[in-house]
Image: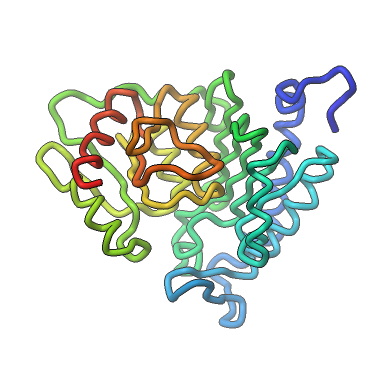
Amino acid sequence: MIEETETIEEFLLRCSADVEEAVRKAAAAEILPRFRHLAEDEVDHKSGPHDLVTDADRLAERRLTEALGALLPGSLVVGEEAVHANPATYEAIQGDAPVWIVDPVDGTRQFVHGDDGFCTLVAFAHRGTVLASWTYEPVRDRFATAVRGRGAFLDGERLFAGPPAPGRDLTVATSHPDYTTPDQKRALRALWTEGVAPRPCGSAGLEYLAVARGELDAVAFSWEAAWDHAAGLLLVEEAGGAHLTLTGEPFRVTGANALPFTAARDAATARRVAKLLRTAG
């Protein structure tokens, strides 16, 4: 709860550890016990054969919704599974109330297949600006956090992405072909060029973390669901990186972005990737 004389920024600094605890508890109770132990009736499809959802997604989101809402009465929660059930829920991101943006299992496909490359994402936004983020890898027990203007951290150590090493190909993770339309594939094909080494992405949250750590040069994505991007984009920004849409503007979690967009470990790399994307946009 925000104290009477407390700003939202002060609240976030004070409660960041409480959010981390809520994320860890949700993962311990609902996600990790089901990892590599999912029953057939615990896995469903949403929009198509590659759009999976599990009981771990639903139950972890339910726990996080209760815990985060209790931390800040009057705040709203926009979770991936709640929006699937009621799309109007997404509109809260554009409102005046503080919003928690939640992806309980980012990388559900990997989770279902027994791959540990998934994470839990939470971001806090107010009036369209992401102010804080939490990225948790339950199996590897790694936790990345960021508060706007305060830096990005992984397990307490400051993250600095830094520029790519000169003279080598840029490594870029792109929207996975299974999740792209023919038009999106054509737009992203501009990255298959000299000096760039693209590959399909895994969990978006973990790709953003790789950019923030300087292990990956950039991402290029063709969709704008806030739960996939909000936490990671702030992490990249606070590690010194940048993000741009096709119009040269930063990505907006409120939507209406010119797609595809990129996030990169420094501004120069973001401009380079965005320029390539514009050639096919």
| Residue at the far left in the pictured view | 194
Residue 4, position in %: x, y? 90, 22
Q: Residue at x 12, y 44 (%)?
A: 193
In the image, residue 171 sits, relative to residue 63, either above or below, namely above
Residue at 38% in and 43% down: 258
Residue 190 sits above or below residue 33 on the image: above
Residue 139: % across, % down: 54, 53
Q: Outermost residue, bottom direction?
A: 41
Q: Nearer the viewer, residue 184 or 234?
A: 184
Residue shown at the point (84%, 44%) measured from the top left: 70
Q: Is residue 253 left or right of residue 167?
A: right
Between 110 and 204, the residue placed more toward the observer is: 204
Q: Position of residue 265 (x, y in %)?
A: 35, 29
Relative side of 33 to 269, left or right? right
Look at the picture and state if 192 lies above or below 208: below
Rendered location of residue 245, percent (x, y): 37, 37
The reply, left or right, for residue 190 in relation to residue 129 is left
